[in-house]
Image: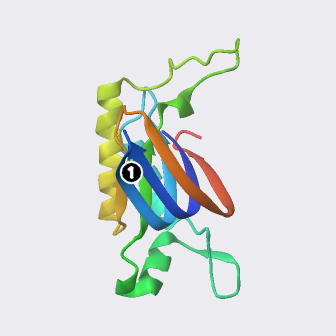
Amino acid sequence: MKAVVQRVIGASVRVSGSLRGCVDSGLLVYLGVALKDDESDADWLAEKIAGLRIFEDAEGKMNLSLKDVIQDAGETEASIGVLAVSQFTLLGDARKGRRPSWGKAAPPEEAKRLYEYFMGKIREAGLRCESGEFQAHMQVTYTNDGPVTILLDSRE
C-alpha cells in the first residue's frame, strides 16, 4: 500500500462539481492499494500517518503529530483532519515505454474494501477522516503547507 501524505491548509475533493469531502487543515492522503496488500498494510499506514510528526511545535520544529495538533486546538477546531483520496495511479509502473502499466494495482473490489478499512482505522485513531469517491473522476484542491510531502510504502 502506498501513500502520498501532504500537510495542508485547506483541502477539498469534488465529484461532478459537488463537494465530497474537505478539511480546513491537516493531512491530504492519496492512497494506492497494491495486489498483495491486506489489512496489516492498512493498519501500518493508518498508525504511521496518525503519529507522523510533521507539524511544527512552539519552537518551529516538526515535532507534533496530527493527533497532537487536534488535542492542542481543543473543541474549537472540528475541521482539522485527514482527507483520504483513493489513487490507483500511485501503483503505475512507467519504467518501460511511455504508457504506465497498472498491473500492480489491486482489483477495484479489494482496493475499495481496503481503502474503506484504512479510513476506519484513521477514525479509530481519533482523527476526523473525510474522503473522495472511490473510482470517480475527482478534482482535488489543496494548499500544501511547508511544503511538506511524505511518501510511505507499507512494503518498503
Quadrant in which the C terminus is drawn: top right
Question: Left or right: where does residue 79 sit relative to residue 65?
Answer: left
Which residue, as the protein is rendered here, is positioned at the far top?
97
Q: Which residue appears at 66% of the width and 60% of the height?
A: 148
Q: Which residue appears at 43% of the width and 49% of the height?
A: 13
Which residue, as the protein is rendered here, is positioned at the far front?
17
Give the percent coordinates (x, y) of residue 86: 43, 40
Question: Left or right: where does residue 17 sit relative to residue 62?
Answer: left
Given residues 95 and 9, the one toward you in this image is 9
Q: Is residue 109 above or below residue 99?
A: below
Q: Which residue appears at 51% of the width and 64% of the height?
A: 10
Give the percent coordinates (x, y) of residue 63: 62, 76
Disc 1 is placed on an element classified as: helix
Q: Is residue 130 above or below residue 3?
A: below
Given residues 42 and 145, the one toward you in this image is 145
- Identify which amino acid the numbered label 1 is placed on: Asp
